[in-house]
Image (cartoon, rainbow, N blue to C red):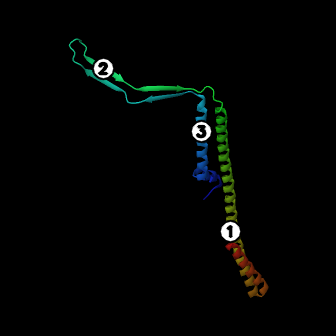
Amino acid sequence: TLKFENLKEILFKNNKDILSAESKVTSSNLNLKSLQSKWYPRLSLNSSGSPKYVSGFTKNNLSNNTSSKQLQNNISANFEWEIYNPSRIPDIKEGFYNLEISKLDLEKLKRDLYLETISQYFLIKKIIQDINISKEALKVSKVSLSEAEEKLQAGIGNKLEVLEAKTQLKRDQLRLIK
């Protein structure tokens, strides 16, 4: 059976709208970090090939050392730092506000879905209670009809009481169907 205490957990577990909103919050957070990184210097390392170790031997009668060994590496480094860039402050503020908006949207979505779920939960509980009440009323109407028929057979009742009991039984049956 579904319990009230489990509603929030069940609702938030695999809801696609909530997962989408959480993804938007994560995206906004990463965007803000990317914008904040404009304050810091950037270092780029480039390599146009893998390091090579070349060794060779040359026969030369004039020299004792005829071997050659070389280490070749093509690496370049680029260091950039924009000291003055007035456009980054509004960009960072915009990123921060977008993150706050996405967090608030997530909380609003969670709250709205939870309130809607609570409403539906209590509506279902009310319907179940109405069905149980209608079943009990139907039992009472059947007992009332049988008592009215017994009174009529015993001579102390009249046909009007039996007719009223039958009418009430039909009303209770209709209420149970609705």
Identity of the residue drawn at 64% across and 32% down:
88
Name above or below for residue 141 compared with residue 16.
below
Q: Are marks 1 and 2 in contact (CB under 8 Å)?
A: no
Closer to viewer: mark 1 or mark 2: 2
Q: Secondary structure at mark 2?
A: strand
Quadrant of the rendered image containing residue 85: top right
Along the viewing direction, whichever of 129 and 119 lies nearer the viewer: 119
Ranked by sequence position, the earlier of labels 2 and 3 is 3
Quadrant of the rendered image containing residue 156: bottom right
- What label does residue 69 carry, if any? 2
**Residue topped by disc 1:** 131
Ranked by sequence position, the earlier of labels 3 and 1 is 3
Name above or below for residue 71 compared with residue 140.
above
Identity of the residue drawn at 58% across and 35% down:
34
Q: Is residue 20 left or right of residue 65?
A: right
Ranked by sequence position, the earlier of labels 1 and 2 is 2
Kind of residue sitting beneath label 2: Lys
Q: Calculate the distance from the C-alpha at mark 1 to the C-alpha at mark 2.
A: 94 Å
**Residue topped by disc 3:** 31
Closer to viewer: mark 3 or mark 1: 3
